């Protein structure tokens, strides 16, 4: 049996484990949160290194993208460096392949149209593949990187601007503690309604679920959420807030959708290759063989 373990800086309350079969291979897939404790995450990776087939890195990104540039986050690099034998991935490979395909899949197979819709992408740098695909549909897209990551009430309306801002800020931002930018540990359990204007103006709210949830308004009637990594309690929360449609880019496994880091870890384990040896077309080929499709659920 192949084993994939996602080591996350997120809350341990969201831990989950499933056994399943993928392309004829039996898998044990597990998510283990360290409640924001980076040293605990490093220790866990060292403990399991060489004993599992792939690690996923959750609750943080190793790489973020803007334009044609890739930026490395220093805190995540410390964690990744703890793995000496087992390959470790942060999901960025799938964010730039699978999540691009989600947009066309939804239009072609689910009747979800994006042209002329108003879309809020909470962070383009975190979900650049999705952001580019949505921008190409003719939708009116607001990128919330400055709002949701830095607390600056400045909406961005073009990917070119994202690239420019990233070139200026990322050399500094990539070195600050990741917890300054993104909710980790117990902070993932707290909702502080904020920035409601940007939520309410959008027909579709897209991007990382923890960033969406962090400032979620009390009422979002009729909206569509395009995201990842939701638990049954997250789904109940969205239903209570009035969300009409939930789309997750990764499929549901035993009641929840795992993060892109987990699914990328599964693909790495299937190939037996190092992540930097896997070409984009190989990811796509495996996804097609798996019969991949996003989860689409009508909530209200």
Image (cartoon, rainbow, N blue to C red):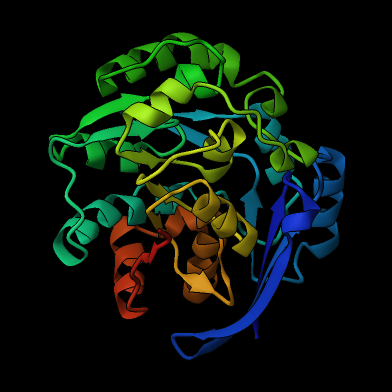
Can residue 272 be seen in this snapshot?
A: no
Number of numbered discs on residues = 0
Left or right of residue 282, residue 267 in this image:
right
Q: Quadrant of the C terminus?
A: bottom left
Q: Nearer the viewer, residue 129 or 54?
A: 129
Look at the image and tell me in which quarter the N terminus lies: bottom right
203 sits left or right of 244 in the view:
left
Q: Is residue 28 above or below residue 129?
A: below
Q: Residue furthest bottom?
A: 24
The answer to which quarter of the image holds residue 191 is top right
Could you say where residue 20 lies in the image, as x and y percent from the top left? 58, 84
Where residue 136 sits: x, y (%)? 16, 37
Relative to 194, residue 266 above or below: below
Residue 135 visible to an observer of this rendering: yes
* Residue at image point 63% right, 30% down: 182
Which residue is found at the position 39% from the left and 49% from the top? 226
Residue at the image point whose x is 50% and y is 42% from the top: 208
In which quadrant of the rendered view does residue 251 lie?
A: bottom left
Q: Picture quarter containing residue 27? A: bottom right
Depth check: give the residue in front, 253 or 111.
111
Query: Depth check: 194 or 151 in front?
Result: 194
Using the image as rendered, state which of residue 152 and residue 62 is in the foreground: 152
Left or right for 88, reference 170? right
Q: How far across and how far down the image is residue 8, in percent? A: 71, 50
Q: Residue at x 70, y 31 (%)?
A: 75
């Amino acid at each position: 049996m192949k084993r994939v373990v996602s080591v996350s800086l997120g809350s341990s309350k969201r831990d989950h484990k499933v056994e399943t079969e993928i392309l004829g291979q039996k898998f044990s897939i597990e998510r283990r949160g360290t409640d924001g404790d980076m040293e605990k995450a490093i220790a866990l990776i060292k403990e399991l290194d060489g004993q599992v087939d792939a690690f996923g890195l959750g609750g943080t990104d190793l790489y973020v993208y803007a334009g044609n540039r890739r930026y490395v986050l220093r805190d995540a690099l410390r964690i990744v460096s703890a793995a000496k034998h087992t390959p470790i991935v942060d999901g960025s490979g799938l964010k730039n392949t699978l999540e691009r395909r989600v947009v066309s899949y939804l239009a072609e197979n689910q009747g979800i149209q994006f042209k002329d819709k108003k879309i809020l992408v909470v962070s383009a740098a975190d979900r650049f593949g999705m952001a580019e695909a949505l921008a190409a549909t003719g939708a009116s897209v607001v990128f919330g990187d400055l709002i949701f990551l830095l607390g600056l009430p400045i909406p961005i309306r073009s990917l070119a601007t994202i690239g420019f801002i990233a070139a200026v800020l990322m050399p500094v931002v990539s070195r600050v503690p990741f917890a300054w930018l993104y909710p980790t540990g117990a902070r993932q359990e707290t909702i502080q309604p904020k920035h409601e204007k940007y939520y309410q103006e959008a027909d579709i709210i897209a991007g990382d679920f923890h960033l969406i949830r962090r400032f979620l308004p009390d009422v979002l009637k009729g909206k569509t959420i395009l995201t990842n990594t939701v638990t049954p309690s997250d789904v109940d929360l969205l239903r209570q807030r009035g969300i009409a449609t939930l789309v997750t880019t990764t499929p549901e496994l035993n009641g929840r959708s795992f993060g892109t880091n987990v699914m990328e870890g599964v693909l790495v384990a299937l190939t037996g290759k190092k992540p930097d040896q896997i070409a984009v077309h190989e990811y796509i080929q495996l996804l097609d063989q798996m019969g991949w499709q996003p989860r689409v659920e009508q909530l209200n």
